[in-house]
Image: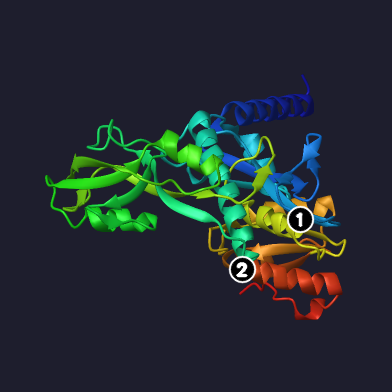
Amino acid sequence: MPRRTATMLASTLVLIALLCAGVLIKVPYSEMSPGPTVNTLGDSGGEPVLQISGHKTYPTTGHLNMTTVRVTGADYRMNIVEAVYGWLAHDSVVVPHDTLYPDGKTDEQSNQENAEEFSQSQESAKVAALNELSIPVKSWVIVSSVVKGSPAEGKLHAGDAIKAVDGAPVTKPADVATLVTKHKPGQNVVFTIIPAKEAEAAKKAGREPEGGEKLTITTEKAQDGDRAIVGIQAGTDHAFPFTVDIKLADVGGPSAGLMFSLGIVDKLTPEDLTGGKFVAGTGTIDDTGKVGPIGGIEMKLIGARQAGARYFLTPKDNCEAAASDIPSGLTLVKVDTIRDARQSLDKIRTGDTAGLPSCSAK
């Protein structure tokens, strides 16, 4: 065999071996890429995303799109070829697997956590929107979860309303820990609670749970300190004066909160928030209307621009990262609260965009 032919054959075999190795060898990385965007003012799966009954609503125009990020699953392991391609591509990001799935989370665990966060974000979006419109919302403290093997297991249950601890009224989740930690481990603490079924019935009737029964629990020492605990996580539940349903499947996480809240405000007010403009955005939101940062901001910008967005509502704490690589034709608008977002939408609607608060890279 001529030397030239032998060399080419050897090179080809080496290349094939390298390609095979690249496909077979797994690396501890995951990929993020732009996911679909959904207009909160429009439909999804053949029905409106936001469904409001029991209160007057108004026509809306334009877009208030929530944005998403696609990620490889917790149980999926990229190979070298996929990782290199992802590193070179402009519309994807390759990150260490543990960044997206810390503590060895499985797909099932991650999906469950995302579903819970999505549900909570919807609740907070409703509260923030109604508070912004000065529509009263009844709120009370509940048991969000009970730690397995803790003193509270079998006595308190998720959804139980907590009215008082040691006779002191409870008005916010932090009150529970404050009152429990006044005790020493091993001492008794008295909860005044309304069982979850009764609390849920009151919620459906649009009223705050009333009454309560006393329950004594013996505290124990926390694993990370000397404080007394009973082993629960406290949260908040709400009763709304009318029905607001958010219908959106196959989406998880808390990052759509801001856009849901703005969509609700738009439907409940005669003034058209967008003036027909295409606005997208992201951000968590709490009951007070405070906007929080999210992950995958670069991918959400790309997805929004590909969908046709011209303006992107960006959480203040994501601004620096977002401004480092802005897709052409997209204007970033910095927001810190739902009130900020409404004021910026006023400027976008009227064309006074020179005064928009912008994001900048340092």
Locate residue 193 relative to residue 360 in the image: left or right. left
Q: Which mark is residue 22?
A: none
The residue sitting at 55% across, 64% down in the picture is: 290
Q: Quadrant of residue 355?
A: bottom right
**Residue 24, placed above or below residue 280:** above
- Whether residue 235 appears in this view of the structure is yes
State the image coordinates of residue 263 (x, y, percent, origin top left).
Answer: 73, 55
- Residue 346: horizontal and vertical position, in percent? 78, 72
The answer to whether one can see residue 294 in this image is no
Badge 1 is on which residue? 267
Report how far apart the C-alphas of labels 1 and 2 lie in the structure: 32 Å
Indicate the amino acid at tag 1. Answer: Lys
In which quadrant will I find the C terminus? bottom right
- x, y percent for residue 336: 60, 69
Name the residue: 69% across, 24% down. 13
Q: Nearer the viewer, residue 13 or 318?
A: 318
Please give the residue where the numbered disc 2 appears in the rendered image: 320
Viewer-proximal residue, 31 or 9?
A: 31
Identified by mark 2, the residue type is: Glu
First in residue order: circle 1 vs circle 2: 1
**Residue 131: percent from left, percent from top:** 59, 63
CA neighbours of label 1 inside 10 A, class few (<14), some (14 to 19), many (20+): many
**What element does badge 1 sit on?**
helix
